Amino acid sequence: MNAHMRAAEPAKFIKGATGDWEVIVGMEIHAQVSSKSKLFSGASTEFGGEPNDHVSLVDAAMPGMLPVINAECVAQAVRSGLGLKAQINLVSVFDRKNYFYPDLPQGYQISQYKSPIVGEGEVIVDMLDGSRFTVGVERLHLEQDAGKSLHDQHPTMSFVDLNRSGVALMEIVSRPDLRSSEEAKAYVTKLRTILRYLGTCDGDMEKGSLRADVNVSVRRPGKPLGTRCEIKNVNSIRFIGQAIEYEARRQIDILEDGGVIDQETRLFDANKGETRSMRSKEEAHDYRYFPDPDLLPLVIEEAYVEELKRHLPELPDEKKARFVESYGLSSYDAAVLVAERETADFFEAVAKGRDGKAAANWVINELFGRLNKEGLTIGNSPVSADQLGAIVDLIGEGVISGKIAKDLFEIVWSEGGDPRRLVEERSLKQVTDTGAIEQAVDAVIAASPDKVEQVKAKPSMLGWFVGQVMKSTGGKANPQAVNALLKAKLGIE
């Protein structure tokens, strides 16, 4: 057992028929490198395209074709390593991992085994309840993707599409540091956010740009690690959670019945919500790894790594800390805002020179709430950062009340336009003229003598009067002024 492995947390144990069990999860994330061409050839990496359109002679493994390393893919792997606070190895080696599969034309995959480009790193994960934990990253290595077998195009034959063959992948291997399906989902979400900030992987799981192999085992608390099963190629964060829940329960049931867990590779069936056996697990020696004779060891300079480091963007953890510090946001609000780089940029545009908390409130509650409801992203928001900033300013200046601001937001969302001009044109201004407010207050008091008696005995009834005055002024009276006037006239402290 690793010395730095996490202590048991009883709250996360799974109840079995014969007592508590602890689930242990480790992951291998396959992230497709954002680059225009493949790892060892000039063929396009663009998604889609007719089958076998983006295939060079290298990808098709024609005799005599030699791989040539794509420098941009190397840079992307180093950037990702730096983003994971990991050791960058200045010398790494490409190996051949031998196995036969119809969509692997060479009969081997070029990968990295003993000497990966990136060594140990870590990912700090924040949970919704405010707790945080660290997941150790064992390594990140570069490898080429295989093609895709299509089994549903013909009744008796399988077709092979090699468009993906040779596309660069980063395999990011975590330590077995995860203790629940929730933690696993949060880890993948955070890792995906980091890669998207760096621009090294677009993280689009629907297109297969990010896929997870999930290793699951269970044990009695405090006992040695159990036998693990690997669930291959899970392509959504929700499915990762479901696969872990199902697999942990399956293993517990077997062990409680006196059975043993076979180390094997399994698949997750999303329709049935269950995992099923695929093949018994091979060990590394089954793949006969050896250094690829066509590729020299990859040697990079310290200065090259430093240069890449200098140009890294601000990463989510740093950005979150800055938002808390500079804008006075809660840790939770800051985490919500930095989850996507676009969102964080949008918020900063709204908050610039304004009250950060008010800006965050409007971005998270009003804007996100509405975008989610309409199924839109921040990229196609009908309300721009400038428009939202103007609404925040109008409230801050006391020109409009919070209630009017929501109506104004609605108008800007549906019709567009400059909020300041709209307030003028549609006379949405808050009434701050005490004379006008006083008239409304007097009218309400005169109309309800019985309530006036009650409020003196029960000051909490003041809210009813405030409501009546706001109603009579169409919600435009300044609520603070209304409150102050009513208290004075009704003789309430």
Image: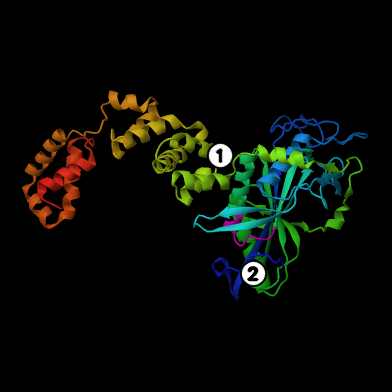
Give the amino acid at mark 1.
Arg
Q: Is residue 371 above or below residue 460?
A: above
Give me the residue at 73% from left, 42% from top: 78
- Left or right, 127 with respect to 201, comes to left
Give the amino acid at mark 2.
Asp
Q: Which residues are magenta?
A: 175-184
Circle 1 SS class: helix
Q: Which residue is mark 1?
A: 341
Circle 2 SS class: helix
Q: Quadrant of residue 423?
A: top left
The colour scheme used here is rainbow
Residue closer to the observer: 226 or 160 = 226
Q: Earlier in the sequence, mark 1 or mark 2?
A: 2
Q: Position of residue 141 (x, y in %)?
A: 76, 47
- CB of mark 1 within 8 Å of CB of mark 2? no
Q: Which residue is mark 2?
A: 253
Q: Is residue 95 above or below residue 217?
A: above
Q: Can you say which quadrant of the picture contains the N terminus?
A: bottom right
Q: Position of residue 221 (x, y in %)?
A: 63, 72
Q: Quadrant of residue 279?
A: bottom right
- Left or right, 72 with respect to 346, comes to right
Give me the residue at 67% from left, 69% from top: 254
Residue closer to the observer: 412 or 372 = 412
